[in-house]
């Protein structure tokens, strides 16, 4: 089929945000990347694949507006347009929440494919926010992906899990199983990067992580207070006050859509200064 | 850094707590006007009732909810074809 290559531009691109390990920033990343793509004028939808433990709605700030969900659509209880929640800040942005009451078995391959195919017609980008782990939910989130953002902290268990996930992207996905199809384009996004700890040798460098994983780097998101604040408020970090994390996500999205942006290692200046002051004082 | 933190930024933690309290109150009680799981059935029943009087399609109904602290609202929009197709 001709639909698996980039030749047919009108069809939206499916990008999975995955990691294996939990708590590394998948949902923060999904929300930030989705919002930044939309702000740049691309029609974007972010889908929560974490059935039973939905949280994308909270991070995006639309938790009070959920009526129908992804599972209702898969099971034919609601139409896709009824389940999509249009963002009130950005007209190009929508969220497809998942069910809080069902379990992951409700995600069927055929059901997911049908929904994604319908979304591809309306949206330029479909961001699939994967649950942690490598079980059914994570596998369904990655199965139909054209590209993958592998979210990794510079920490041993996260890097190891990312390596495992990269292996799955190359073996169990739709693209991996189709002869002649391009493999899933996977890129690593390093999050919670703490420059001061890297400088003092306490944290692996970006180069260390890339050497181990051997995949291209999409961006480096610094450890930043702005991320917790944005989650508290239910605002994607790129739509909140300017911060080093927001700027890093903006750069990463630029690269995601093919812009040449030099890699930079940022940090919130006030925090770095504070830390240095403390370190000297102690 | 102190100059920067003079801005009123402290509110975010209390916003987080409020949002959680409202959401979890609804999730625990299954209240807020309607349980999420009863909405598909509600939708079918509304369509059935309306169809007794008018001809409308499956996609003609749109249900929106807004969960609030004090009260929640359910907004139901039903689209009719150009003319009201009364049976």
Image (cartoon, coloured by chain):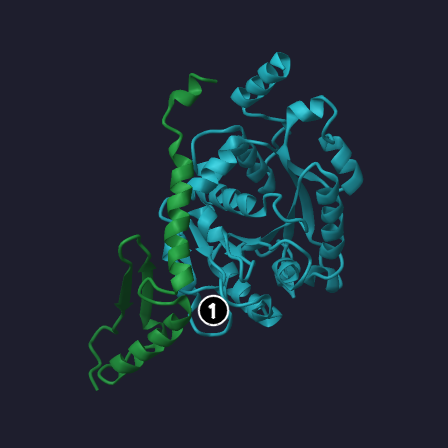
For chain B, give the colour: green
Residue A152: x and y in percent read 67, 42
Residue A157: x and y in percent read 73, 44
Specify the subunit that label 1 lies on: A
Q: Judging from the image, what is the letter of the chain drawn in cyan?
A: A
Residue A43 visible to an observer of this rendering: no
For residue A118, side relative to residue B73 (left or right) = right
Where is B48 relative to A86, above or below?
below
Question: Which residue appears farthest toward the front when viewing the image?
Answer: A282
For residue A212, side relative to residue A249 (left or right) = right
Q: How many marks?
A: 1
- Residue A177 quadrant: bottom right
Question: Which residue appears farthest toward the top when viewing the image?
Answer: A281
Residue A166: x and y in percent read 73, 50
Q: Kindly identify which residue carries mark 1.
A: A73
- Residue displayed at 46% across by 38% down: A230
- Residue displayed at 49% across by 62% down: A100
For residue A245, side relative to residue B54 (left or right) = right
Quadrant position of the C terminus of chain B in the picture? bottom left
Query: Local crowd at mark 1 within 10 Å, few (<14), some, or many (≥20)?
Result: many
Residue B49 visible to an observer of this rendering: yes
- Residue displayed at 49% across by 29% down: A243
- Residue A282 quadrant: top right
Residue A97: x and y in percent read 47, 58
- Residue displayed at 34% across by 67% down: B34
> The residue tagged with tag 1: helix, strand or loop?
helix
Residue placed most toward the observer, A236 or A229: A229
Where is A89 relative to A121, above or below?
above
- Residue B30 quadrant: bottom left
């Amino acid at each position: 089929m001709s639909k698996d290559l980039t030749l047919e531009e009108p069809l939206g691109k499916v990008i999975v945000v995955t990691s294996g390990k939990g708590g590394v920033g998948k949902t923060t990343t999904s929300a930030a990347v989705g919002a930044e793509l939309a702000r740049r004028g691309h029609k974007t939808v972010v889908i929560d694949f974490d059935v039973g433990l939905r949280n994308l709605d909270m991070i995006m700030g639309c938790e009070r507006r959920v009526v129908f969900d992804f599972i209702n659509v898969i099971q034919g209880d609601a139409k896709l347009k009824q389940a999509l929640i249009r963002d009130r800040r950005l007209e190009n942005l929508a969220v497809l929440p998942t069910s809080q009451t069902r379990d992951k078995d409700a995600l069927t391959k055929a059901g997911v494919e049908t929904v994604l195919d319908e979304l591809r017609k309306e949206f330029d980008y479909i961001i699939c926010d994967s649950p942690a782990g490598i079980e059914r939910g994570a596998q369904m989130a990655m199965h139909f992906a054209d590209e993958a953002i592998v979210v990794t902290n510079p920490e041993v268990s996260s890097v190891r899990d990312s390596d495992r996930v990269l292996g799955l992207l190359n073996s169990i996905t739709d693209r991996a199983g189709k002869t002649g199809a391009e493999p899933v384009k996977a890129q690593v996004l390093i999050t919670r990067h703490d420059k001061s700890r890297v400088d003092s040798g306490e944290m692996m460098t970006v180069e260390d992580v890339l050497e181990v994983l051997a995949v291209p780097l999409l961006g480096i998101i610094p450890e930043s207070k702005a991320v917790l604040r944005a989650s508290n408020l239910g605002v994607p970090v790129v739509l909140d006050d300017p911060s080093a994390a927001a700027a890093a996500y903006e750069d990463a999205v630029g690269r995601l859509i093919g812009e040449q942006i030099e890699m930079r290692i940022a940090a919130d200046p006030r925090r770095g200064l504070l830390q240095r002051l403390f370190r000297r004082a102690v | 850094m102190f100059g920067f933190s003079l801005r009123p930024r402290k509110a975010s933690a209390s916003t987080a707590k409020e949002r959680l309290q409202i959401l979890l109150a609804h999730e625990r009680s299954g209240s807020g006007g309607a349980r999420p799981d009863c909405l598909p059935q509600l939708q079918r029943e509304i369509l059935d009732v309306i169809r007794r009087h008018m001809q409308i399609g499956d996609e003609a109904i749109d249900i929106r909810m807004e969960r609030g602290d004090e009260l929640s609202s359910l907004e139901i929009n039903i689209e009719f074809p150009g003319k009201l197709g009364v049976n």
